[in-house]
Amino acid sequence: MSAAIPSPKPRPTACLALADGTVFYGMGFGATGDTVAELVFNTAMTGYQEIMTDPSYAGQIVTFTFPHIGNVGVTPEDDETAQPVAAGMVVKWDPTEPSNWRATADLASWLAARGRIGIGGLDTRRLTRAIRRQGAPHAALAHDPNGNFDIAALVAKARGWVGLVGLDLAKDVTCAQSYRWDETLWVWPQGYGRREGPGLRVVAIDYGAKRNILRCLASTGCEVTVLPASATAADVLALNPEGVFLSNGPGDPAATGVYAVPMIQGVLAAGLPLFGICLGHQMLALALGAKTVKMNHGHHGANHPVKDIDTGKVEITSMNHGFTVDSQSLPKGVRETHVSLFDGSNCGIRVEGKPVFSVQYHPEASPGPQDSFYLFERFAASMQARRAA
């Protein structure tokens, strides 16, 4: 009996070309074409849809270290913004048909309809190790069902990409005009709710705000008005807010700070409670006189331990940032409140004697535990105290 002849491997339909000339081949899904961006890795085991629709990932291709991506499909309830913002995704295993009662579509068709490219079948461990050692590289991701690629041109695109340093991306992902927000957090079995009646008047500055942050504010009694990133201090104060919130967002904080810092300084001068998250944390630090720096590969995941210096408590947090506040540059009167237990980088600040604070991580993301929700309650309490006084 003759031995069975093994089936030939299918021709790769996607490739990932790094700026150093390294090329990874795999099977494409989602949209066709090519895109260029910074390549980062995310260690979260769940939440791939929330990650792809998080505006903080603008200008980035995300490598998922968890191998099973796409197995619960997608649902509009999990979108953090109207459309995916991350440039593309890299996964270990090709996405399978979804197996979840909440799914309304499969991941591949969802990406295709929204112009985002995916590549499966890559050694994501090897890729992640390379990113950790060498830093987040510039990369070109291409998907062609016929498997025809101009590798030299893709590498050249990766090498020629401008990068995130000096790039203001908040202006690209912010809202076009102001709007009100009253949707509250998802609760089983009702789903999302609505806040009713008068509340604490909060102006949220949208540098790329995630919907669940706004839901957390509404759930803690806030009557939220969202303003674009370009809003001035006069725009904010004209709404007579009781507190101001600075949202997450993408890009280089120093570039966004050109127009954001004067607004924040105007709000600080008015003595209002202020709370910032992620890019909003970095914006506040810049407004107070500190500096930000680009990290080697950043923090992207849902398992990041952060220590509260005041209480000694350790929170398991969700993070997504490639820049960090230089804690050595914090001015007098501004205190570091939280630090990463992975690398000691700054994760929170507070202005002494004032209701002004911010954190680098995402307290709204609830990566299993809800360790950090107290921050929204602290913000609400500071506004209640000011109202009572």
Image (cartoon, grey):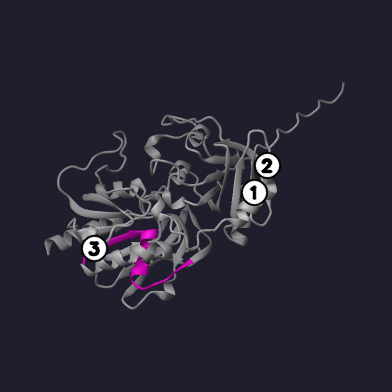
Going by the numbered disc 3, the residue's amino acid type is Pro
Would you identify the image quadrant in which residue 277 lies?
A: bottom left
Asked if residue 308 is among those painted magenta in the image, a careful observer would answer: no
Quarter holding the C terminus? Answer: bottom left
Q: Element under label 2?
A: loop
- Judged from this view, the residue extending furthest toward the left is 389
Q: CA distance from mark 1 to mark 2?
A: 8 Å
Mark 1 or 2 closer to N-term? Answer: 2
Q: CA distance from mark 1 to mark 3?
A: 48 Å
- Residue ID for mark 2: 149
Vertical arrangement, residue 375 with respect to residue 11, above or below: below
Residue 154 is tagged as: 1
Q: CA distance from mark 2 to mark 3?
A: 54 Å
Q: Residues within 10 Å of mark 2 (few under 14, many from 20)?
A: some
- Residue ID for mark 3: 273
Would you identify the image quadrant in which residue 296 lies?
A: bottom right
- Judged from this view, the residue extending furthest toward the bottom is 332
Q: Is residue 133 left or right of residue 60?
A: right
Residue 334 in picture, x, y percent from top left:
33, 73
- Residue at 70% from the left image edge and 35% from the top image edge: 11
Extent of the magenta region:
271-293
Q: Residues within 10 Å of mark 1 (few under 14, many from 20)?
A: many
Q: Mark 1 near mark 2, Cβ–Cβ under 8 Å?
A: yes
Would you identify the image quadrant in which residue 262 lies?
A: bottom left
Vertical arrangement, residue 122 with respect to residue 257, above or below: above
Residue 371 in picture, x, y percent from top left:
36, 54
